[in-house]
Image (spheres, grey):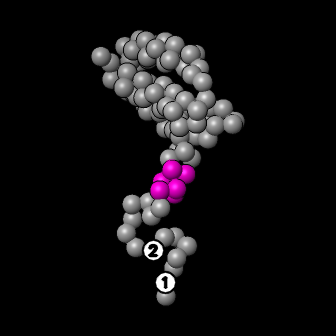
Amino acid sequence: MSATTGPVLAMGLITIANQTVFHGKPLDWRVPIATGLLAVAFSGFERVWMDGAKMLAYTGLVAVTLTRVQATVPSPAESAVSWWNSTGSGGASGPKGGDIQA
């Protein structure tokens, strides 16, 4: 398995999970197909320039995490932050952000 396969497959998985699991949208079959084709393309690109392919794959992973794919669906980072804030204290002990004690 090539070094860029993990980040490329993670991009597809994050996109699918964010749209279908967390926001109830129907599965867009173009995402898994494009993810598979992109993994093959990156595998070929690694043979030309290994460091550049890895750098581009991880940059794509960060971009997928931080940007919206559809205007109506929040980005995975926005979804994670809203989930974290909705769980109460967010795992931290002590007062919440708005409860400042003097």
Image position, residue 37 (x, y; %): 49, 12
Whether label 2 touches label 1, CB < 8 Å: yes
Query: Vertically, is 88 above or below 37?
Result: below
Left or right: residue 46 versus residue 38 is left
Residue under label 2? 95
* Pick the front one: 31 or 52: 31
- Residue interval drawn in magenta: 81-87
Looking at the rendered structure, the kind of residue marked 1 is: Gln
Residue at mark 2 to residue at mark 1: CA–CA distance:
8 Å
Question: Earlier along the polypeptide chain: callout 2 or callout 1?
Answer: 2
**Within-10-Å neighbours for mark 2: few <14, some 14–19, many 20+:** few
**Within-10-Å neighbours for mark 1: few <14, some 14–19, many 20+:** few
Image position, residue 8 (x, y; %): 44, 24
Please count the marks in the image: 2
Q: Quadrant of residue 73?
A: top right
Asked whether the viewer can see residue 11, the reply is no
* Pick the front one: 12 or 46: 12
What secondary structure is marked by label 1? loop
Q: Quadrant of residue 48?
A: top left
Query: Vertically, is 83 above or below 40?
Result: below
Question: Which residue: 50% across, 47% down?
Answer: 80
In which quadrant of the rendered image does the N terminus lie?
top left
* Pick the front one: 14 or 90: 90
